Every structure is written in structure tokens, then in C-alpha cells.
Image (cartoon, helix red, strand yellow):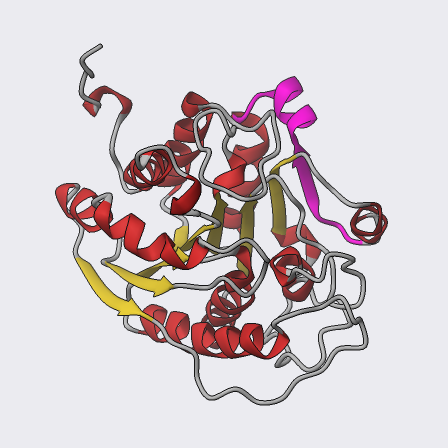
């Protein structure tokens, strides 16, 4: 496992509920760097990014808000994630809402293209995030990254995505809330949609192993984007987009342990943590614990908690 670089992305512009900008600080307070170091990995913290000077930007859809800010974050994150990968490290992007993936995955894609390696995307989320700025009715751009990554049209004036990821290299996992417009668009792409029905029927292991085997077979890089709402809100309340029926504590840790065993993950997003909605930091601590499993912590390493 390469050394890790933490990149804070205090982004709130992709949605309307304030609080995600506090996410990077919450991860640091919850001991993310310590948890990674404890497993024998090097950690650098590059601090929090800030917005560059903004250019005017307009969209034909009047519902879209914070367009210039979101484009600014996208440009900044693209460069920083590319820099971290170019330094031989595994970037972990501390969000921030899910619009940060517009930039984080673009940075990974730019780097992968220079290496002449295919980039794969594992989207651990309750939502498919397959709107474009022209189709979103909420105007919240955190619902658009997968469409941008897959090369859908309608993203002017965003910078062109460096190397759009073909649908068969994208895996939506844990999905349980898809708008009709997104559903119709997904049917025209060869994207693996492992919704909770699939996971209930097949279990969490088989669909994930199948996808990871494809990454391995093609010599690919793997970007993992982990949204707090991938988890059931009963164990992870600190998110503004709760959808009942998410993954359990055990299922989520199993996913992370399988990812560790694959040794394929090259970059990671932690998104949509809103500490203002948390219960004494339980969600931040759980997300840190999940990163621990991704970095090699085993289930039998977990301490017993006093009742």
C-alpha cells in the first residue's frame, strides 16, 4: 500500500444544507491520520484546499446554484489529486459534499491516462448521482458527478472530463434512490448497478468480487467514492440525504476488508459527512474505522467496548 496523502475539501456548494464544510476537521478530530499510521502506513496532510479566483459561469437550467464555486473546486481538486498520485501516494479526499468527486475523479483520470492504465470507479452511495446540470430539478450539483465521469453531455462550462470512464468500468454499489431521469439515462449506459435488492439477493461479496476481478484483469487503477449515506442512517446519522435501508456496520466493514485484500484501491473520497447532524461524533468515528479496514485493520483487531 502506498503512503497516503490527506486532502481536505471543505465544500458545501454542491447542495443546500450547510455543514459539510466542517467534514475535513471532523475526520481529523476523529483521528484519521493516527488510524492510518497505526497500521504502518505513512501519512501526509496537505491541509484544506481553498477556492481559486472564480470565473463567471451560467447554466441554461435556472435551478442550478453555486455553479462558479463548484467549477472552481473541480479545477482545484483535479490538480491536487493528480499531484498526489504523481507523487506515488494514495490521496484520501476529506469532504465536503459529493460534488468534490467532479474534481477528485478527474484528477485520477488525468493521471491514469498518462500512465496508460484504465481507471475504474466504485461508487458507494445511496444515490446514482447521474444527473447533469441540465436535468437536475433540485439544482444540487452533488447529484451530477457520475454523469460527468461517464462523459454525459450538458456539463458546459465545466472543463472537459480528462478521459471519460466507460460504463463497464463503473460500479454503483448500495444504490437505493434514483430519480426517473437518472434511471432512463442509466439504461443507455453499461454501468453495473448493484442496488440494495441485488445485495440482499446475492450478498455484498459476489458483486464486489466480480467487479474487482475485472479491475485486476485489466491492470486498472481503482477510485473509491464513499458517501456517508451508503451506510444505514441508524449507524451514520450525520448526512443530509438519509435513505433508510443502507448497509450495516458488518456489511460496510466487509466491503472495506475486501477492498484492502484486493490491493487495487489507488484513491479514495470520504463525502457528505455533516458533523452538525452527528451524534457525538459517531458517524465520523465510523467512517475513520472503515478507512482503517480499507487500510488493513482486521475484524479481530477491534477492541471490546464497555456496556
The location of residue 100, given as percent across then percent down, is 50, 63
The location of residue 84, given as percent across then percent down, is 32, 70
Horizontal side, residue 29 vs residue 219: left or right: left
- The quadrant in which residue 157 appears is bottom right
Q: Residue at x 47, y 77 (%)?
A: 114
Does 202 lie within the magenta span? yes
The location of residue 35, given as percent across then percent down, is 20, 42
Q: Residue at x 44, y 41 (%)?
A: 277
* Residue ranking furthest to the top: 307
Image quadrant occupied by the C terminus: top left
Horizontal side, residue 38 vs residue 175: left or right: left
Looking at the rendered structure, the number of numbered marks drawn on it comes to 0
Can I make out residue 220 in this image?
A: no
Please tell me whether residue 11 is drawn above or below residue 230 in the rendered image.
Answer: below
Does 77 lie within the magenta span? no
- Closer to the camera in the image, 298 or 243: 243
Give the extent of the magenta segment.
189-204
Q: Residue at x 35, y 36 (%)?
A: 290
Can I make out residue 162 in this image?
A: yes
Horizontal side, residue 13 vs residue 257: left or right: right
- The quadrant in which residue 285 appears is top left
The location of residue 299, given as percent across then percent down, is 28, 23
- The quadrant in which residue 82 appears is bottom left
Amino acid at each position: 500500500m502506498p503512503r497516503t496523502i490527506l486532502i481536505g475539501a471543505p465544500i458545501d456548494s454542491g447542495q443546500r444544507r450547510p455543514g459539510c464544510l466542517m467534514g475535513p476537521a471532523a475526520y481529523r478530530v476523529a483521528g484519521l491520520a493516527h488510524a492510518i499510521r497505526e497500521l504502518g502506513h505513512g501519512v501526509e496532510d496537505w491541509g484544506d484546499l481553498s477556492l481559486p479566483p472564480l470565473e463567471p459561469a451560467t447554466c441554461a437550467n435556472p435551478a442550478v446554484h453555486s455553479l462558479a464555486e463548484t467549477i472552481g473546486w473541480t479545477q482545484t481538486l483535479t490538480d491536487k489529486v493528480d499531484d498526489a498520485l504523481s507523487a506515488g501516494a494514495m490521496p484520501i479526499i476529506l469532504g465536503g459534499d459529493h460534488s468534490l468527486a467532479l474534481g477528485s475523479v478527474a484528477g485520477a483520470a488525468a493521471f491514469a491516462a498518462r500512465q496508460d492504465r484504465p481507471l475504474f470507479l466504485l461508487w458507494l452511495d445511496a444515490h446514482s448521482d447521474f444527473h447533469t446540470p441540465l436535468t437536475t430539478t433540485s439544482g444540487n450539483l452533488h447529484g451530477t458527478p457520475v454523469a460527468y465521469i461517464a462523459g454525459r453531455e450538458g456539463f458546459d462550462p465545466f472543463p472537459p472530463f480528462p478521459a471519460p470512464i466507460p460504463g463497464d468500468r463503473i460500479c454503483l454499489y448500495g444504490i437505493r434512490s434514483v430519480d426517473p431521469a437518472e434511471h432512463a439515462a442509466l439504461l443507455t449506459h453499461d454501468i453495473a448497478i448493484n442496488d440494495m435488492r441485488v445485495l440482499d439477493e446475492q450478498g455484498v461479496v459476489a458483486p464486489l468480487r466480480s467487479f474487482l476481478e475485472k479491475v485486476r484483469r485489466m491492470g486498472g487503477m481503482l477510485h473509491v467514492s464513499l458517501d456517508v449515506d451508503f451506510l444505514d442512517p441508524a449507524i451514520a446519522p450525520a448526512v443530509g440525504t438519509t435513505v433508510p435501508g443502507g448497509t450495516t456496520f458488518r456489511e460496510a466493514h466487509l466491503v472495506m476488508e475486501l477492498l484492502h485484500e484486493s490491493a487495487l484501491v489507488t484513491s479514495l473520497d470520504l463525502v457528505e459527512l455533516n458533523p452538525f447532524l452527528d451524534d457525538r461524533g459517531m458517524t465520523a468515528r465510523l467512517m475513520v474505522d472503515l478507512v482503517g479496514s480499507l487500510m488493513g485493520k482486521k475484524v479481530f483487531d477491534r477492541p471490546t467496548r464497555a456496556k
